[in-house]
Amino acid sequence: MDFIKVIGFKKSFGTKQVHSGVNLSIQKGECLGLIGGSGAGKSVILRSLIGLEKPDEGRVVFDGKDITDYTEDELVNIRKRVAYVFQGGALFDSMNVYENLAYPLREHTKLGEPEISEKVLTKLKELGLEGNDKVYPAELSGGMQKRVGLARAIIMEPEVILYDEPTAGLDPFNTVKIQEMISRLKATGVTSILVTHDMPSAFAVCDRIAMLAKGKIGAVGTRAELDASPGGIIHKFINGEQL
Amino acid sequence: MIQTFASSIGGFVLGQLQFVGGSTVLFLHSLKEALKPPYYPQLIVEQINQVGVRSMSLIVAASLSTGMVMSLQFGLGLEKFGAKLYVPKIVSLSIAKELGPVFTSLMFAARVGAGIASELGSMTVTQQIDAIRALGTSPIKRIVIPRVIACTIALPLLTVIANAVGTFGALTVGQFELGLDSGFFIQKVITTVKIGDYINGLLKTFFFALFVVFTSCYYGLNVKEGTRGVGIATTKAVVASSILIVVSDFFLTKLFWIIEKWIS
Ligand SMILES: Nc1ncnc2c1ncn2[C@@H]1O[C@H](COP(=O)(O)OP(=O)(O)OP(=O)(O)O)[C@@H](O)[C@H]1O
Ligand SMILES: [Mg+2]
């Protein structure tokens, strides 16, 4: 059975229709790469999976439940299970790095301060950010903010992780680190969707790749399936051709 | 030409309707969410410090000078009719009933309204509000409600301070410029201003605080078009809450007056 399902997703902003019927399904434990041009609507799809955005038409199904019309209250239980890694980190700038990471733990668990501290410092270390716990987000580089954002998203050990361009703007070393992180999480059984422009990363960690173009999923398949269809839309996209 | 004029009027009306509808919805949501845990007492304390304690110097300066100027103006004006002795009565009554509450609220709208709108606006633009939601928590609970509680506590208290400081300013000018004995001044103030007048004024500021905080939260949370939108939202928040204060002042005064008559 499909773990996450998007059915006939349509969305317009003002007079501009961005999605004209997107269908997508993700299996449990799978990593799906979602690619597409800038402004194709990848972030909007990702946001709707946790109800940050509602489709004009169409359904979003999560673990057998139609969550399209869930209220903010009802969505809390979904959001505890699904982490969202924001494109720019979206760190709380009134809190330091430590407080940012501790936030979900304080809100959703009954852990005491020693356990919280241990979890936070371990996560920071895993992402190569040790020693930055007292620093405020404004003092971090863009790439570091991204990694702190990632750390905050995964600290609750979610079942599903939605990555919005986690490697964009990172240096090669950190890109590889994030790739490894995603693979490692996937190996523990996490289901993930990776929105990216970074094809090497997508090929390195994703089981299947879907391409969003002209408001629909233009193509979807495993690496082998895509390689078998040269001249397809994904090849054109990768080679920088006009779609 | 006529068409652009008509469409800009249409846009304006639409914007106002959105504001009224949106801020009412925000108000109702906040009421609903305020009843359910979790509560964030330490965020409320932080906000009281932010909106109340830090507004103190502005309020003190403004009310001191207002009281002094009023006393001087009335003193010089009434002196011609030999009615200088009425200065304490007139000044203290107008401070307690109108000037204290309304002036303080307008200052509050400028400082605190702008602060809230721009802070929430930046949080919206940098997706921090989305992040609060994505992490399974509520921006209304964490951001809006602490500010609402802080403002409704802080503004009446600031008004109490403003009234006292304003009256003190008037008294100083009375003593040194008008030659009114300060003992006489104080006695006149006490016999003129009834506790009801005083409470009326403070009660109004409770409503003014609600106008300021919901207006600025609404504009801040609905920022579009990036950083440019933050500036626009801030301006709109201050303008709208100031207008709401001065307009509702009339109706609140009238309403309280009716209630007062009805009670007695
Ligand atoms: N809140 C909004 N208001 C108006 N338009 C929006 C809004 N959110 C998204 N859009 C529009 O929807 C389209 C898709 O946006 P989205 O952010 O999903 O693109 P994307 O595929 O993630 O692009 P990128 O790769 O640049 O991040 C864009 O054209 C954008 O202008
Ligand atoms: Mg995007």
Image (spheres, rainbow, N blue to C red):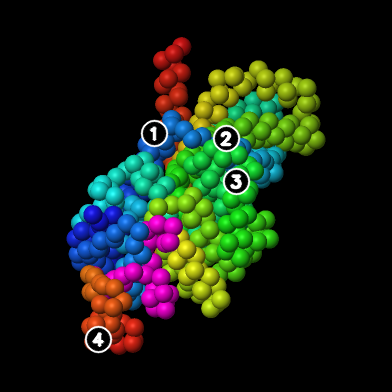
Ranked by sequence position, the earlier of labels 1 and 2 is 1
Label pair 1/3, CB-CB below 8 angstroms: no
Label pair 4/2, CB-CB below 8 angstroms: no
Element carrying mark 3? helix
Q: Which residue is mark 4?
A: A230
B90 versus A94 height, above or below: above
Marked residue chain, label 3: A
Q: Which residue is mark 1?
A: B32
Indicate the position of residue B208 as horizontal and vertical percent values. Answer: 49, 37
Q: Which residue is mark 2?
A: B41
Element carrying mark 2? helix
Q: Residue at x 23, y 54 (%)?
A: A1
Indicate the position of residue A174 as horizontal and vertical percent values. Answer: 55, 73
Kindly identify the amino acid type of the residue bearing the numbered disc 1.
Lys
- What stretch of residues is rendered in magenta? A186-215
Q: Residue at x 31, y 72 (%)?
A: A209
In 3D space, how far apart are the residues under numbered discs 4 and 2 (Cα atoms)? 61 Å
Q: Residues within 10 Å of mark 1 (few under 14, many from 20)?
A: few
Closer to us: mark 4 or mark 1?
Answer: 4
In 3D space, how far apart are the residues under numbered discs 1 and 3 (Cα atoms)? 31 Å
| Label disc, if present, on residue A116 of the rendered structure | 3
Marked residue chain, label 1: B
Label pair 4/1, CB-CB below 8 angstroms: no
The residue carrying mark 2 has its beta carbon less than 8 Å from ligand 1: no
B99 versus B122 height, above or below: above
In 3D space, how far apart are the residues under numbered discs 3 and 4 (Cα atoms)? 50 Å
Q: Residues within 10 Å of mark 3 (few under 14, many from 20)?
A: many
Instruction: Say whether residue A11 is visible.
Output: no
Q: How many marks?
A: 4
